């Protein structure tokens, strides 16, 4: 996978639980889990914006490009 979601790392640094974050950004805990576990195929900008707002971070703190090994 070329884009890694480091949401779990940011959440740990901010000491916030998945349930609490899901409630704050108004998504289901299941959808947050999909993001957190790198299973998502896409993310809405509105969701990314809400994550950044609540976690007080930048999109680059959550998303990381990782070059595929050949």
Image: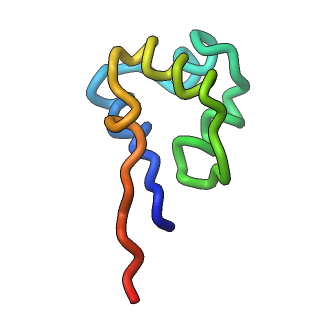
Q: Position of residue 67 (x, y in %)?
A: 36, 70
Left or right for 45, reference 27: left
Q: Quadrant of the C terminus?
A: bottom left
Q: Is residue 35 above or below residue 67?
A: above
**Which quadrant of the figure has residue 45?**
top right
Left or right for 55, reference 18: left
**Residue at x 54%, y 17% (from the top left corner):** 50
Q: Is residue 60 above or below residue 55?
A: below
**Residue at x 66%, y 32% (from the top left corner):** 44
Q: How many marks?
A: 0
Q: Residue furthest front?
A: 45
Camera-side residue of 20 and 35: 35
**Residue at x 41%, y 19% (from the top left corner):** 16
Q: Position of residue 17 (x, y in %)?
A: 47, 23
**Which quadrant of the figure has residue 58?**
top left
Q: Position of residue 55 (x, y in %)?
A: 39, 18
**Residue at x 54%, y 50% (from the top left corner):** 37
Left or right for 31, reference 37: right
Q: Residue furthest bottom?
A: 70
Q: Position of residue 32 (x, y in %)?
A: 62, 33
**Which quadrant of the figure has residue 68?**
bottom left
């Amino acid at each position: 996978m070329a884009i890694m979601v480091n949401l779990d790392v940011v959440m740990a640094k901010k000491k916030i639980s998945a349930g609490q974050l899901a409630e704050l950004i108004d998504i289901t805990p299941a959808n947050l889990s999909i993001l957190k576990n790198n299973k998502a195929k896409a993310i809405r900008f509105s969701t990314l914006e809400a994550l950044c707002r609540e976690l007080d971070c930048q999109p680059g703190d959550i998303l990381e490009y990782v070059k595929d090994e050949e």
